[in-house]
């Protein structure tokens, strides 16, 4: 529609007399315009006795523009009516959407679900941090226990060596102390 209107306006431009006036399917619209103006000039010469001036053609050009752009004006009015209808439908849809957002329980449920998800995620992060700290603590504890275990083994080994050394100094005919107590008490 805009392209058709531009084409018609170019045809009305007096600076370009050879520009086509109507649509491209006319054979030579410029000749047609020139013929119409010449005929109007003949009609005006026959009705007036004064020499022709551009003011004499005012009525002709006014009528010509009114008839020439009638189709475009009608199209514009139709487009305006459709635009008004679409705007009103859009406003109604927007109002219904806003209303549904206010009264829809699904929105509230979704908000609650999102809050639960956020709370769960934050709890997960806290638990993950606690687990990491616990893992570090037990790794340190395991290292300490391994060192103590080695120290205890060393201590036990030294005591066993001392016990062997002490057993080597005992009197050969005496029974071991625990057995001798049992024998004498009986």
Image (cartoon, rainbow, N blue to C red):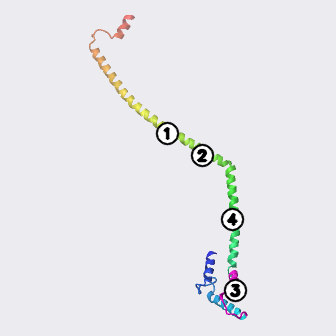
Among numbered discs 3 and 1, the one appearing first in the sequence: 3
Asked if residue 50 shows in the view, the reply is yes
- Asked if residue 154 lies left or right of residue 45, the reply is left
Residue located at (67% from left, 55% from top)? 97
Among numbered discs 2 and 1, the one appearing first in the sequence: 2
Q: Mark 1 points at which residue?
A: 128
**Mark 4 nearby-residue class (10 Å; few <14, some 14–19, many ≥20):** few
What range of the chain is rendered magenta? 47-67
Tell us which disc is closer to us: 2 or 4: 4
**Mark 2 nearby-residue class (10 Å; few <14, some 14–19, many ≥20):** few
Residue 114's label in the rendered image is 2
Under circle 3, the secondary element is helix
Under circle 2, the secondary element is helix
| Residue 102 vs residue 176, the one in the foreground | 102
Q: Mark 3 points at which residue?
A: 60
- How far apart marks 1 and 4 lie (CA) works out to 55 Å
Magenta: main secondary structure: helix
Q: Are marks 2 and 3 in contact (CB under 8 Å)?
A: no
Among numbered discs 1 and 4, the one appearing first in the sequence: 4
């Amino acid at each position: 529609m805009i392209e058709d209107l531009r084409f018609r306006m170019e045809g009305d431009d007096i600076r370009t007399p050879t520009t086509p006036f109507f649509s491209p399917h006319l054979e030579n619209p410029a000749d047609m315009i020139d013929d119409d103006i010449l005929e109007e000039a003949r009609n005006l010469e026959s009705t007036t006795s004064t020499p022709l001036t551009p003011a004499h053609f005012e009525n002709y050009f006014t009528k010509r523009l009114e008839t020439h752009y009638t189709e475009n004006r009608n199209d514009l009015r139709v487009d305006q009516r459709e635009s008004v209808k679409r705007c009103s439908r859009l406003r109604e849809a927007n109002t219904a959407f806003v209303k549904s957002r206010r009264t829809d329980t699904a929105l509230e449920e979704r908000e609650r679900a999102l809050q639960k998800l956020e709370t769960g995620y934050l709890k997960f992060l806290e638990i993950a941090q606690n687990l990491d700290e616990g893992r570090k603590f037990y790794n340190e504890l395991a290292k300490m226990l391994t060192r103590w275990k080695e120290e205890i083994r060393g201590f036990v080994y030294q005591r066993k060596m001392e016990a062997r050394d002490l057993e080597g100094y005992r009197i050969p005919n005496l029974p071991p102390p625990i057995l001798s107590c049992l024998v004498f008490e009986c």
